[in-house]
Image: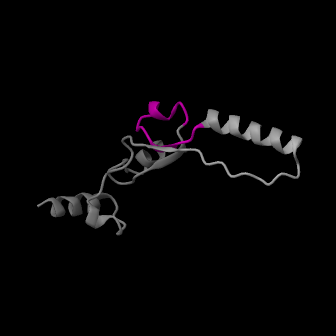
Amino acid sequence: MPALEEKGLSCPDDISATGFNDMPFINRITQPLVTLHIPHYNLSIQSAQLLLERIREPEKTAKTVKLESKLIIRDSTILLPKEMVRRPIVGARARASIAQSND
């Protein structure tokens, strides 16, 4: 975010930002980041169990395991009106377009 500030830009007004992994520190930065939470603990448990299964039974068919992730909404993006979702809009144009669509 400091690099944006150096260029005179702000988040989320000019640029929306998202992250991946929901690291523990991410909600403590200046602009709390929207992120996808990955269940790290469950992921590591499942990985270890699958590895042990593979070691015990190397001929067994591989498994696919799906773990639920969660989108954590914070302040690094803006919510666009539905009709604007498919058009890329940046900065002041976004604010102007949102103002027009709300009239």
Relative to 46, residue 25 above or below: above
**Residue 81 placement: quadrant:** bottom left
Is residue 27 part of the magenta span, yes or no?
yes
Q: Residue furthest bottom?
A: 87
Q: Is residue 57 left or right of residue 16?
A: right
Query: As rendered, which of 25 and 47 lies closer to the eye?
Result: 47
Number of numbered labels in the structure image: 0
Q: Is residue 81 above or below residue 32?
A: below
Foreground of the two, 66 or 16: 66
> Vertically, is 56 above or below 25?
below
Residue at image position (46%, 49%) is 18
Left or right: 76 with respect to 93?
A: right
Is residue 32 covered in magenta?
A: yes
Residue 78 screen position, x and y as percent: 32, 51
**Which x, y percent locates residue 35?**
48, 44
Residue ID at (69%, 39%): 46
What residue is rendered at 44% in x and 50% in y? 17
Q: Tell me where residue 84 sits by quadrant.
A: bottom left
Pick the front one: 78 or 90: 78
- Tell me where residue 75 sits by quadrant: top left
The stretch in magenta equals 23-39
**Residue drawn at (68%, 52%) of the image:** 64
